[in-house]
Image (cartoon, rainbow, N blue to C red):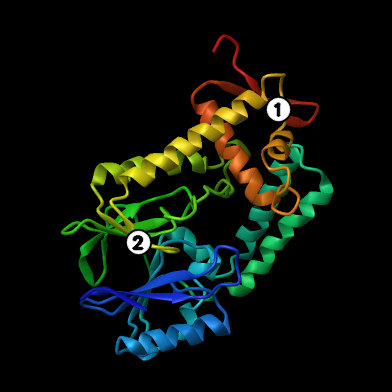
Amino acid sequence: MKVIDKTISQITLPTPFAVGDVHVYILEGELLSLIDAGVKTKEAWEAFQIQLKEIGYGPNDIEQIILTHHHPDHIGLIEQFPRVQHIIAHHQVNRWITRDTAYFKHYRQFFKQYFTLSGVPEDLLAGLELQESTLAFIGEGELTNTIDDGDILPGHQEWTVIETKGHAQSHLSFLRQQDQILLGGDHLLKHISSNPLMEPQEVGQTIDQRPKPMLQYRRNLEKCMELGIENVLPGHGRVVRHPISLIQERLKKHEERAEKVYHLLDNGEKTPYQLCMELFPKQFQSQIDLTMSVTFGQLDYLEDQARIYKTVKDGHLVYAKTVNW
């Protein structure tokens, strides 16, 4: 547990994921709020109660929960607070905590269809089913209120909602303008890059309307530079102080990796899967969802610059360099 200031305390919880520990925050104001809710494990719940007691509270004191995004290490303990009247987040979080089976079917179909189109062999598609196992770490409930860019946090009038899509389509951060502190979820982490992750298009849209999270993420990183943020309280790792230099570093790394992808096309067109294998020769088989997300992030960036184009040949999506670039 770490007291940030008189109204913010950071609580650190274990997770079973490679990312390691996750931070949640107690926010004091007109209401006592929990920002993010860790992962649904006995170990996380026990650690939470111990650290909450150190700042003079118990689970019955939490009045509302505010979530930065829908990933399982941020929404796991939402069921544990008997006096909570409000669960608040971007509207897309609701499909995860309500276990929206129709959306989950759409989600699975998107990845199977798009990865098959991208050249991923059938035996690796089975690895996508591992995503289903993460549902065990997600709390069950239902949003009572939704928030979006420009809104004020209920019970905390000094905090403004900032849209920070990219790492997740549901991702929001919260800015206190008086001292330029950002409760940033996973938007900007000091020790690791927050990968922009692929998600399906909305139900009823066509597959070519899928979100392009790399482009969203870069825009929202640039927006954070313009906002003059002084400190980012993250979902993982250390507080990010004076984040402009780190943001610039992240943007540069994106561009460097995109340049590598661009040169992988020197000898002609390739499928996204072929590029993924070359970019991540040691990881692609065990982490096909993550490595393909990163690959598509670079392809979307290069396509947005009109340096490459895509087409479908023999039933597979292929990318090639634009002539006379």
**Does dot 2 land on a helix, a strand or a loop?**
loop
| Three-letter code for the amino acid on which mark 2 is drawn | Val
214 relative to 80, above or below: above
Which residue is at the front of the view, 211 or 130?
Answer: 130
> Picture quarter containing residue 90?
bottom left
Residue at 70% across, 27% down: 318
Rendered location of residue 153, percent (x, y): 27, 65
- Circle nearer the N terminus (1, 2): 2
> Picture quarter containing residue 262?
top right
Disc 2 residue crowd, few under 14, some 14–19, many 20+, Cα 10 Å: some
Look at mark 2 in the image and give the residue it sits on: 239
Residue 134 in view (yes/no): yes
Task: Assign the N terminus to one quadrant of the image.
Answer: bottom left
Rendered location of residue 126, percent (x, y): 79, 55
Residue 300 in view (yes/no): no
| Three-letter code for the amino acid on which mark 1 is drawn | Val
Which residue is at the front of the view, 25 or 309?
Answer: 25
Residue at 67% across, 23% down: 265
> Picture quarter containing residue 127?
bottom right
Rendered location of residue 197, percent (x, y): 55, 49
Rendered location of residue 20, percent (x, y): 54, 67
70 relative to 83 in the view: left or right: right
Residue furthest right in the image: 123
Task: Assign the C terminus to one quadrant of the image.
Answer: top right
**Does dot 1 land on a helix, a strand or a loop?**
strand
291 relative to 67 in the view: left or right: right
Residue at 58% across, 47% down: 198
Look at mark 1 in the image and give the residue it sits on: 318
Residue at 41% across, 67% down: 67
Disc 1 residue crowd, few under 14, some 14–19, many 20+, Cα 10 Å: many
202 relative to 150 in the view: left or right: right
